[in-house]
Amino acid sequence: MEIQVAIIILLVAVIIAELAIFLIATIMQLFKINAGLSVVLPLVGQIVAKTGPVNPVVDDINANLVVTRDALENLMLKKAGPDSAGLVESLFPGEGAKFLRRVGRTGKVVNVGTVYTRGVGILAGLGRGAPIGAAHIKGAAVRDPKYSTTEVAKLYPAPPDRRDPTRNIPKAPVIGKDPVHSPYEAALTPGTRTRDAQGRKIETPPPSAPPAPGSRPWER
Amino acid sequence: MADAALWIMVVVLAVVILLLLQLLKRVLQAATSIPAKIDAIAGVAAAASKDLDAVAVLLTTQGYIQSIRASVLDYGGSLDAALPDY
């Protein structure tokens, strides 16, 4: 046998051995991969099964929240009118414009909270008889703690549709159309009305003597 | 002439051995790297599956939201009746 043939046979044997060694090693790795995947696949199945009901549940939650939001927004529009966006803006800055877009309205959003401190807007909504400016916001409450409901009943003795039309009680003022100028006069005499419900000036009564201690109803 | 052909064949086979060695080495490397990644994926999948146990609580949340919706709508109806319209 010639030397070349012997070398060729040797080289072919090396090739076969090389192929066998590497292919066996690769097959071993494939077995490991198969085992690993058999562990992973059930876990992926669990994930799929557990996330399956998420979409319908979240959709249902979103639908409920949207219905609730729409109902409350419609109620606010019905009760607060053009001030609605300003009220929303005062509670959630930046949401007033979105609110207007949602309800299909346009206009300037005036943050009610920057014009009126919290609570004053509510008092203003009660009507011109509300004691706006009667005292400092940080001062004592401008109401009789004992007979406050009586005072409110005097302002509005009945809901608008059941009020006596001859009394001509004015409608609640619009807040926020021109926030720079308050619809209320500056209170020169806190706690005292200078004009009546029809806008006529009220004659200033002569100063009365302060009540004797113990004569007030809440001191008895 | 026949000798030359045999030597050429020897050289070709030697080159083939080297190329085959490189090729099979890369295949084995790729195959070896896969089990480690699968183990990592299995760990993550197990943790994710465990985390998703909390998804069942969403059903409770759904129930709460439905109750809240009903309460808010009732409350809104009461406010609608109690407060004057603008």
Image (cartoon, coloured by chain):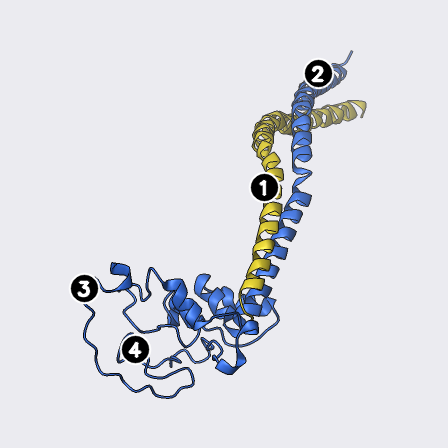
Chain colours: A blue, B yellow
Residue B52's place in the image compared with A101, above or below, is: above
The x, y position of residue B51, in whole percent, is 56, 32
Question: At x 60% / y 65%, what residue is drawn?
Answer: A74
Direction from residue B58 to residue A150 in the image, left or right? left
The x and y percentages for residue B64 are: 58, 43
Whether marks 1 and 3 lie on the same chain: no
Q: Disc 1 and disc 2: Cα gap in Å?
A: 65 Å
Q: Nearer the viewer, residue A7 or A28?
A: A28
Looking at this view, is B19 or A140 the one in front? A140
Please name the amino acid that badge 2 sits on. Ala
Circle 1 sits on which residue?
B61
Protein chain holding label 2: A
What type is the residue that disc 3 sits on?
A: Pro
Asked whether A154 or A87 is in front, the reply is A154
Q: Chain of mark 4?
A: A
Label located before the other in sequence (3 or 4): 4
Labels 1, 2: front one: 1
Pointer 3: residues within 10 angstroms few (<14), some, or many (20+)? Answer: few
Residue that carries the numbered disc 2 in the rendered image: A17
User: Are callouts 1 and 2 both on one chain?
Assistant: no
- The image position of residue B5, as x and y in percent, is 78, 26
Tell me the distance, in whole angstroms, between the alpha carbons under discs 4 and 1: 53 Å
Question: How much space separates mark 3 and mark 4, taking CA atoms?
Answer: 22 Å
Up the image or down, A35 lies above or below A87; here it is above
Mark nearer the viewer, 1 or 3 = 3
Residue beneath label 3, please? A213
Q: Amino acid at mark 1?
A: Thr
